[in-house]
Image (tube, rainbow, N blue to C red):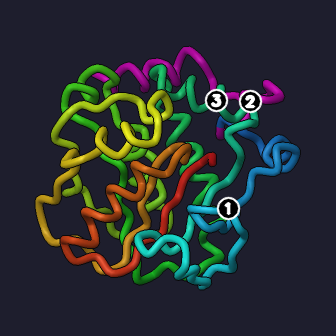
Amino acid sequence: MIKLYHYFQKLVSPKFCLSCFNYNKNYLCFDCLRKLNFKPNFNCLECGQKVVEKCRIKDHSSLIKYLISFGFYENEFLKRMILLGKDGYQEIFEDLGEIMSGFLKNYDFKDYSFAFIPVTKRKLIDRGFNQSEVLAKKLAKKLNLKIFSDLIKIKETEDQVKLDFEKRLNNLKDVFKIKSLPPKKIILVDDIKTTGSTLKECAKVLKEAGAREIIALTILR
């Protein structure tokens, strides 16, 4: 039913850039991407310090090698675009995945597989899709990489942003589980990095199950 809905939506509502409102193949055109400074940034997940592609900051996070993000959470337009996508416009995340893959093809990730921050079955039913999964699958397809889908979330949690530091730690305890042996190298995808706690908890579970190197990738940070 969801696929039929989006197919019908395409027929009655041609796609246009959500920034300049000109007709375009994606929800962001090239000119607006440039104006929004939408491009990959390589940063330490903990302190935000810029790193080069192969840099390791051993004194900071041993779980995640670095974070790749394309914009800042303070950018109101990009934030509204993601919220609109979560409100039912799944194709926004497919378009963002295609756009992001265009940048990432210039880097060597051939030994990596994509994984994504999972949601519970209840959340998946409520929304109809997992935006991180949609994003990861589009990236994997465009970059010709494998996807690992056996990281699962087994119980509901509160929004991390609304909790203090101590409650954040307990909120994610024993929430994620692995169903099969993960790849050795993983690019872990989420839509937004806020506190980084969810990314680190998933990375911890993946590494305990056998993953050796993890890169985090988000649209915003």
**Dot 3 crowding, Cα within 10 Å, few <14, some 14–19, many 20+:** some
Tell me: residue 76, above or below residue 37: above
Q: Residue at x 19, y 32 (%)?
A: 121
Q: Position of residue 192 (x, y in %)?
A: 54, 43
SS for callout 3? helix
Looking at the rendered image, the disc whose residue lies closer to the viewer, 2 or 1, is 1
Q: Amino acid at mark 2?
A: Phe
Residue 19 drawn in magenta:
yes
Q: Earlier in the sequence, mark 1 or mark 3?
A: 1
- The reply to whether discs 2 and 3 touch (Cβ–Cβ < 8 Å) is yes
Q: Amino acid at mark 3?
A: Met
Cα–Cα span, label 2 and label 3: 6 Å
SS for callout 2? helix
Quarter of the image for residue 32 reads: top right
Q: Residue at x 44, y 75 (%)?
A: 62
The residue to which callout 3 is attached is 81
Q: Is residue 154 left or right of residue 74?
A: left
Q: Is residue 144 visible?
A: no
Q: Which residues are magenta?
A: 1-26
Cα–Cα span, label 1 and label 3: 23 Å
Q: Residue at x 28, y 27 (%)?
A: 123
Looking at the rendered image, the disc whose residue lies closer to the viewer, 1 or 3, is 1
Q: Amino acid at mark 1?
A: Gly
The residue to which callout 2 is attached is 77
